[in-house]
Image (cartoon, helix red, strand yellow):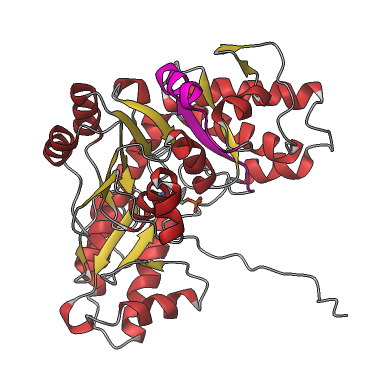
């Protein structure tokens, strides 16, 4: 028998695509919640209040708006649960995450024979995957053309593709879905809590799924926000789905949503953690106190500062998300992306490579919305490049940062 020593995990600079930096207030609520079971009145009240605040954060009147215990994929698994074997689906893929969404869809839509033929990577005849090259966005025209041709029951894409750092055209997607009678499903894992948008402005989209740990800043494994229109729920009710725990109608009951309406008290679906409910509740309060619009502005401002600093180091940025920068290194360092990322990570400076080809560097600023944090990231990255032998023009980097933050130039 081995009893390992107590586990210690160091504090890192979480400057990647996610998880983001959880607010100290969220951790404090997590750690100071009392032990209470999942039917305790205050836990149920907390869940009902979370549901209400989540509707404000997402900008929706969808009654079926709540959290799915777990990570982004838990919410996405629930969202895709309405896709049944043989259903026609068009899936737009422009990076790692929408690629996995595509695999999820093929697993759900595959017939029993198709699944058995290649169970880990089923080729479902009813699913069309539209591949958009890494580094490019899904445009309204691409969606329109595919939906005209295939007229699917479902269409799906990522709102913000975190693999390549690209924003996809959500309005074009929604419009095309409405026009061609497809029900839109959107992976909003990276955009919720970062961009200022209201899901009700996109009526072609019937299912949305996000995550706890990126824009919502609630890593202590809590809840993946989801929202479904009544049309989605009616469609699901008509076909059914083969999951108990991720069944949208069953899971909603614990959040006090029964028969399409808010009810006084949730009813048992599965055990919920008072700690998680308290943490999620505080994260939503913080989001609404700061305001979704103000937060979006802050991301835009600080991303621009870091972008300019990285440009001054000779990096070539190919992303357009405001929470994540995806870049190629200067020409004389091309091919050393992985080495550089590993060098940074070894110093607990937690940047990331891309997870699928081509290899690029990803630097995120989730909940790092201040001059000190952005300057620290820029300085560390510049130093890491020097450590690998690059020449970095420090004056140009300082100048770029100063232009955004308006501080006096360091003594020359
Ligand atoms: C991070 C991410 C996911 C996966 O979320 P987990 O919390 O790791 O389960 C899915 N889709 C997108 C677009 C993401 O950015």
Say which quarter of the image contains residue 144: top left
Residue 111 inside the magenta-drawn segment: no
Could you tell me how many numbered marks the image carries? 0
Boundaries of the magenta span: 221-243
Along the horizontal axis of the image, is 150 left or right of 257? left
Of the pair 34 and 248, the residue shown nearer to us: 248
Work out which residue is located at the far front of the displayed protein and give it.
113
| Quarter of image, res 357 | bottom left
Quarter the N terminus occupies: bottom right
Q: Residue furthest right?
A: 1
Q: Quadrant of the C terminus?
A: bottom left
Residue situated in front as seen by the camera: 277 or 313: 277
Location of residue 298 in the rendering, given as x and y in whole percent from the top left corner: 36, 40
Q: Nearer the viewer, residue 381 or 67?
A: 67
- Horizontal side, residue 125 vs residue 279: left or right: left
Q: Toward which corner of the image does residue 270 lie, by quadrant?
A: top right
| Residue 12 appears left or right of 178 | right
Is residue 332 positioned above or below 187 on the image? below
Residue at 83% x, 36% y is 34
Asked whether residue 242 is drawn in magenta, I would say yes
Rendered position, 135 above or below 80: below
Q: Position of residue 330 (x, y in %)?
A: 19, 76
Residue 408 in view, yes or no: no
Residue 317, position in %: x, y? 21, 61
């Amino acid at each position: 028998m081995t009893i390992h020593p107590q586990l210690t995990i160091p504090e890192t600079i979480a400057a990647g695509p996610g998880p983001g930096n959880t607010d100290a207030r969220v951790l404090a609520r997590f750690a100071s919640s009392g032990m209470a079971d999942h039917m305790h009145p205050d836990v149920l009240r907390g869940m009902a209040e979370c549901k209400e605040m989540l509707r404000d954060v997402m900008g929706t009147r969808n009654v079926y708006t709540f959290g799915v215990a777990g990570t982004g994929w838990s919410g996405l698994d629930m969202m895709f649960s309405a896709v049944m074997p043989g259903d026609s689906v068009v899936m737009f893929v422009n990076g790692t995450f929408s690629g996995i969404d595509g695999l999820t869809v093929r697993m759900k839509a595959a017939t029993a024979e198709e699944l058995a033929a290649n169970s880990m990577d089923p080729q479902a005849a009813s699913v069309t995957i539209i591949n958009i090259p890494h580094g490019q966005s899904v445009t309204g025209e691409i969606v329109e053309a595919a939906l005209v041709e295939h007229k699917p029951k479902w269409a799906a894409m990522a709102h913000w593709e975190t693999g390549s750092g690209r924003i996809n055209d959500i309005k074009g997607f929604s419009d095309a879905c409405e026009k061609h009678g497809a029900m839109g499903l959107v992976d909003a894992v990276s955009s919720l809590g970062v961009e200022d948008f209201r899901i009700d402005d996109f009526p072609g989209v019937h299912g949305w799924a996000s995550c706890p740990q990126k824009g919502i800043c609630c890593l202590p494994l809590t809840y993946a926000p989801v929202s479904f229109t009544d049309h989605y729920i009616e469609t699901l009710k008509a076909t059914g789905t083969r999951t108990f725990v991720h069944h949208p109608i069953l899971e909603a009951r614990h959040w006090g949503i029964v028969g399409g309406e808010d009810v006084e008290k949730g009813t048992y679906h599965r055990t919920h953690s008072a700690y998680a409910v308290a943490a999620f509740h505080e994260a939503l309060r913080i989001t609404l106190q700061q305001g979704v619009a103000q937060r979006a502005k802050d991301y835009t401002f600080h991303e621009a500062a870091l972008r300019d600093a990285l440009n001054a180091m000779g990096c070539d940025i190919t992303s357009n998300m405001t929470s994540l920068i995806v870049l190629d290194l200067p020409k004389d360092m091309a091919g050393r992306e992985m080495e550089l990322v590993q060098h940074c990570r070894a110093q607990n400076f937690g940047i990331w490579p891309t997870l699928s080809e081509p290899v690029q560097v990803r630097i995120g600023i989730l909940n790092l919305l201040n001059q000190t944090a952005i300057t620290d990231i820029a300085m560390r990255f510049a130093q890491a490049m020097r450590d690998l032998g690059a020449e970095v023009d420090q004056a140009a980097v300082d100048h770029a940062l100063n232009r955004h933050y308006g501080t006096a130039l360091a003594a020359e």
